[in-house]
Image: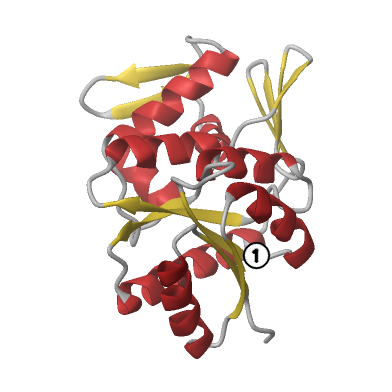
Amino acid sequence: MSAKKILLVDDDVDIIEFMSYNLKKDGYIIETAYNGIEAVKKAQIFNPDLIIMDIMMPEMDGIEACEEIRKIESTKDTIVTFLTARDEDYSQIAGFNAGADDYITKPIKPKVLSLKIQALLRRNKETKETPTNSVKLEAGNIIIDKEKYIIFKDTQEYILPRKQFELLELLASKPDNVFTREDIFRRIWGDDTFVSDRTIDVHIRKIRTKLGDNIIKTVKGVGYKFVG
């Protein structure tokens, strides 16, 4: 099995060196960048399996860089996880809105970093290997193209960040079925990922903004369901 490639992005040289040293010991191939502009360029050349990126950086911050990476065909599905300060909910929510898959809190602990990366790469591998009966899912006036990551509503085409796409796909897979918040967390983020309670709410709000307020119904105290 070939070694996985990781792109590390941070304007703090010490953090880059710390992560690079520990991850190389774990057998990963490492490339580095020190701002968002450099990250976008290197992501296209290096074609990493995972990008670990700080949010606050000069020239182009991590949020903007993630948005640009998601627009590029070769990197739109690359796993992106942000580095954030502990309990920095705003940065975590902004990161998920930009299309991030997860976040790692500072200060970084080598063992936690290693386990987090293993979980992200394993989850991504399982997702790719899970067979689907059809590449398109139709629910009401919504068509979800699971191969191209495109949503169609009344012939209009929409592009959603990865987690929003997966959340909509989950809800639309069983229209009128109520998915609890716990079930959504487990299916979309996995058992080994801890995110803010507001994360689902933010993603739902973003989906509604693009596709309409009535597409997803909130079942108070329980969760959400797709109503089309």
Whether residue 180 is visible, yes or no, is no
x, y (%) of residue 55?
Answer: 45, 46
Secondary structure of the residue carrying numbered label 1: helix
In the displayed structure, 43 sits above or below 110; it is above
Please give the residue where the numbered disc 1 appears in the rendered image.
Answer: 129
x, y (%) of residue 186?
Answer: 36, 51
Amino acid on which disc 1 is placed: Glu
x, y (%) of residue 134?
Answer: 73, 44
In the displayed structure, 113 sits above or below 152; it is below
| Between 205 and 75, the one nearer to me in the picture | 75
- Quadrant, the C terminus: top right
Whether residue 186 is visible, yes or no, is yes
- Quadrant, the N terminus: bottom right
Query: At 53% across and 85% down in the image, what residue appears?
Result: 24
| Between 138 and 209, the one nearer to me in the picture | 209
Along the horizontal axis of the image, is 101 left or right of 137?
Answer: left
| Between 151 and 15, the one nearer to me in the picture | 15
In the displayed structure, 193 sits above or below 208; it is below
In the displayed structure, 13 sits above or below 151; it is below
Chosen colour scheme: secondary structure
Query: At 69% across and 47% down in the image, what residue appears?
Result: 76
Q: In which quarter of the view is residue 181 placed?
A: top left
CA neighbours of label 1 inside 10 A, class few (<14), some (14 to 19), many (20+): few
x, y (%) of residue 191?
Answer: 34, 59
Along the horizontal axis of the image, is 146 left or right of 190?
Answer: right
Query: At 74% across and 54% down in the image, what residue appears?
Result: 41
Total numbered badges shown on the rendered structure: 1
